Amino acid sequence: MASHAANLLSVLSSCSPALSRRGKLLPSPAHSPNCSLKRTAASRLRSTVTHCGSGRLAQALGSMRCVISSLLFMFASSALAGECVAYNREVTLRGTLSRHTFPEQPNYESIPNGDRPATYLFVSPAHAICVAAGNLSNSELAELQVTRVQIVFPVKATGYDSLRPYLGKQVECRGSLFHAMSGHHHSPVLLGGAKCHAA
């Protein structure tokens, strides 16, 4: 069973070209952001399959149950990867506009204790979004449950002023996602170069 699962794994995790509904060969997705999540799931499955044939895990669950559980995990991960958006590509987010204030310089801990307040706008989609891993050297980590995205405008003052009347209302924002990397970033991913309007 473990050997059959390993063979199936090599097929499922290959990120090989796929056929469209019309039977046309699509470009290979080997470098697509979704492949990174599939490879992560595949790596976990390999580790589990390796340990399914012996030891306490096999005694407790049985080799067959162990492999089946691993396959179910990978299928779920692959399905999730198919729904993820990518870093550094234009996306459109629709959701509720909100404003939040955070303590920043010098200690990023407490406004009453002297840290400077900083206020930012956020868009909260109706459903959490998934962002696939990108260039890890740029800290583009996978984020599977993003419920609120900080908005970064090309011109900060103009963006804030134009959106202030829509606080608590639905807006639509277009831009590209990047991962948080500083104390000024207050959501796992942010929407850069954002252009927003009332939805």
Image: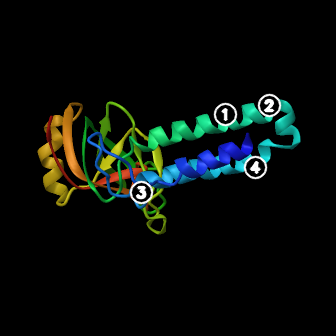
Q: Residues within 10 Å of mark 4 (few under 14, many from 20)?
A: few
Check disc 3 and report the residue beneath it. 180
Which one is in front, 88 or 63?
63
Q: Residue at x 20, y 32 (%)?
A: 170
Q: Quadrant of residue 185?
A: bottom left
Question: What whole-number distance in Å separates the C-alpha atoms at marks 4 and 3?
Answer: 36 Å
Q: Quadrant of the C terminus?
A: top left
Check disc 2 and report the residue beneath it. 61
Amino acid carrying mark 4 in the image: Thr
Check disc 4 and report the residue beneath it. 50
Q: Residue at x 14, y 48 (%)?
A: 161
Residues tagged 4 and 3 counted as in contact (Cβ below 8 A): no
Q: Residue at x 46, y 56 (%)?
A: 108
| Residue 30 drawn at (x, y percent) | 43, 59
Tell me: residue 142, above or below residue 126.
below
Check disc 1 and report the residue beneath it. 69
Q: Nearer the viewer, mark 4 or mark 3?
A: 4
Question: What whole-number distance in Å separates the C-alpha atoms at marks 2 and 1?
Answer: 10 Å
Query: Quick one: SS at disc 1?
Result: helix
Query: Quick one: SS at disc 2?
Result: helix
Note whether residue 48 is visible.
no
Q: Earlier in the sequence, mark 4 or mark 3?
A: 4
Q: Quadrant of the N terminus?
A: top right
Which one is in front, 175 or 196?
175
